[in-house]
Amino acid sequence: MTLDEIRRCAEILAAERPRMKAIGVNCVKPRYVESLIYELKAGCALPVAVYPNSGETWEPVRKIWYGGAETLSFGDYARRYYEAGADAVGGCCTTVESHIRQAAQARAQKLAPRS
């Protein structure tokens, strides 16, 4: 699926599902989420929720997760997601408590009053 298709999907869902309250992505590598947020926001005015995995890859034949960590911390990614316009950030497969704590800290920083 291309970014244009993600945007078009957001447009169609928002138009055809008037009671839908939010839109988002789930179980995506963290490095892809920021661009997806921009496309979802370009396609509709719904709040955006994102739930990336930790950056590993699922191998369905052997049924294992493999690969290394992302180059940025989960918290750094979460800050980028909020800056890109995400309304909620969580975690999916292979995320752990520390990832969610980092996402919560990023949200608190987003909501903190600016001096």
Image (cartoon, rainbow, N blue to C red):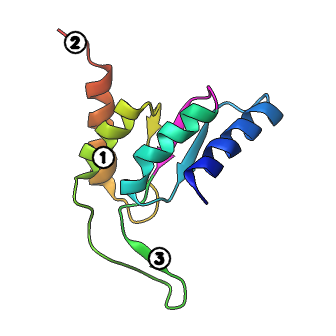
Q: Which residue is mark 2?
A: 114
Whether label 2 touches label 3, CB < 8 Å:
no
Magenta region, residue range: 44-51
- The answer to which quarter of the image holds residue 65 is bottom left
In reply to whether residue 110 is colored magenta, the answer given is: no
Q: Is residue 46 left or right of residue 78?
A: right
Q: Which residue is mark 3?
A: 58
Label 3 – label 1 distance at C-alpha = 20 Å
Q: Which residue is mark 1?
A: 77
Q: Is residue 30 above or below residue 112?
A: below
In reply to whether residue 48 is colored magenta, the answer given is: yes
Q: Is residue 8 above or below residue 31?
A: above
State the SS at label 2.
loop
Crowdedness near tag 1: few (<14), some (14–19) or many (≥20) residues, C-alpha within 10 Å: many
Quadrant of the snapshot with the N terminus: bottom right
Single out the residue that lies furthest toward the left. Answer: 115
Residue shown at 22%/52% (left/top)?
Answer: 73
State the SS at label 3.
strand
Residue shown at 44%/30% (left/top)?
Answer: 85
Single out the residue that lies furthest toward the bottom. Answer: 62
Q: Is residue 12 visible?
A: yes
State the SS at label 1.
helix
Q: Is residue 35 left or right of residue 6?
A: left
Q: Is residue 90 visible?
A: no
Q: Amino acid at mark 3?
A: Trp
Single out the residue that lies furthest toward the right. Answer: 16
Label 1 – label 2 distance at C-alpha = 21 Å
Q: Amino acid at mark 2?
A: Arg
Crowdedness near tag 2: few (<14), some (14–19) or many (≥20) residues, C-alpha within 10 Å: few
- Nearer to us in this view, 88 or 30: 30
Q: Amino acid at mark 1?
A: Tyr
Label 2 – label 3 distance at C-alpha = 40 Å
